[in-house]
Image (spheres, rainbow, N blue to C red):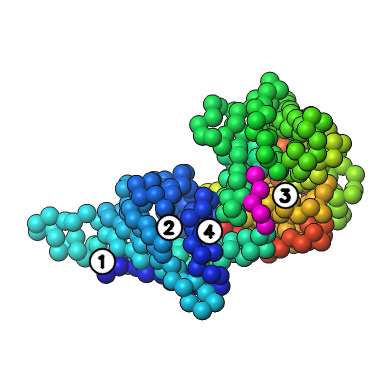
Amino acid sequence: MPDFTYTATYPYAEETVRTWFMRPGALIRATPHWAGSVVEEGNPNEPGSTARTRVALPLTSGLFTLPWVARHTRASADSFTDELARGPLSTWEHAHDFLSTPGNTLVRDSIAFTVLPAAPGAAKKVGATAERLARAAAQKQLKKVFAARERRIGAELDFQQRYQQEPLTVLVAGASGMVGRQVVALLTGGGHRVRTLVRRAPETEHEFRWDPSAGEIDTSAFEGTDAVIHLGGASINQRFTEENKKKILDSRVESTTLLATTLAELVQQRGAGAAPRVFVCASAVGFYGADRGGEVLTEDQDAGSGFLAQVCQAWEAACEPARAAGVRVVNVRTGLVQSALGGMLRLQLPAFLSGTGGWIGSGQQVQSWISLDDIAGIYVHAVLTEKLEGPVNAVAPSPVTAKTLAKTVGKVLRRPVLLPIPAAVSALALGREGVHELALASQRASADKLLASGYMFFEPELERALAHELTR
């Protein structure tokens, strides 16, 4: 008899639900970000394959994790099973069963587990008591995790239903990053084929080597490719020294130029019908500059001033060869991505969890934010929505002040947020210019163009987005 069961209901045919579970990316998309992360997916249809994950300790919002390795043991037309190979529990066997009902599919998760190793001899009674207490705590956490999984999978199936079409082949640069992994998983979950550009030696048939700084790329990656997504670039969460600023700029412009000129050459050599039709490239709301106050920023407004505005202008301009060749180009001007998996929010989590988090500066600067699920969704939407072209603000329709954002994080985590953090403290990590360009930037970017193109948000409101990202 299982020690824990959970039954989720989805308003889709059993074949639709089961097919999604069996596709690459399903585990990445199903895992709540506060509950852990996926290192390597296994194939549920292949007994013996393994999935490697990191499981978060309770109440840490994913900040502290332990390794978990599960081995797939059995698979049939309506179920699959995995067992714990290595992890913090003593034993674990997890059966996933798909049950069809009129108009719905039930997914029943049945788990038999023990938390502690069996106690020897005289300690057996004490061990049994400890096991009961530990099991009760584990069951409480599992209920929370599987409720979050049901919500995530339901939203995922809804997204895939909205974008049903013939599978495409998509080439992705920057696939290993926080956003890139979610974009790839969202694409493969929809049945699309994904190829990736890597700087090391390729290890699979889906990987192709490139070296942007040397201007080198394996052009066979583009054969039969329908779309190209570029997410790469050096992190901006570092001190704005001259050396780091050069790295931030060059990593974006060199890589984008290489992709755009390669696309243009392919169009010239093979004709528009034999080359990728769309190029979706990252950019940022930093395009508008750091000092825009309460001004509503739409995509047709001029660029602002400052280092990041210059970077974004050069980044978007580097796409011009592809645009001039007739390729549909979309520049995704990304807001502040809110995620427990990375970015500024994760960097600030220790302070918020300890009750010492706060806003930087006056707190009145306007911050245009976006959830991790939505930034991934926007990239896929841009590929699949032919009428969307040019720059698009990838932001939620409800920007907030920095003080409101900090207060909302505290509310979700049930921690006090009482005082501002002096800008000088942040300057230790980012430098004075970095603080001005990032932490103190005020940009009220409009989501109207994105909404008009038909995009439906996973999480349009901040409190719900943070709750799903950090606690439930």
Task: Identify the amino acid type marked 3.
Answer: Val
Within-10-Å neighbours for mark 4: few <14, some 14–19, many 20+:
many
Res. 80 image quadrant:
bottom left
The answer to the question of whether label 3 and label 4 lie on touching residues, with beta carbons closer than 8 A, is: no
Q: Which residue has dot 4 on it?
A: 20
Q: Which residue has dot 3 on it?
A: 383
Along the horizontal axis of the image, is 273 left or right of 172?
Answer: right
- Badge nearest the viewer, 3 or 1: 3
- Find numbered disc 1 in the image and state the secondary structure of the residue it sits on: helix
Task: Identify the amino acid type marked 2.
Answer: Pro
Q: Which residue has dot 1 on it?
A: 132
Residue at position x 86%, y 56% from top? 296
Percent from the top left, x then y, of residue 123? 13, 58
CA gap, disc 2 and disc 4: 28 Å
| Numbered range of the magenta stretch | 165-169
Within-10-Å neighbours for mark 2: few <14, some 14–19, many 20+:
some
Circle nearer the N terminus (2, 4): 4
- Is residue 166 on the magenta stretch? yes
Q: Which residue has dot 2 on it?
A: 58
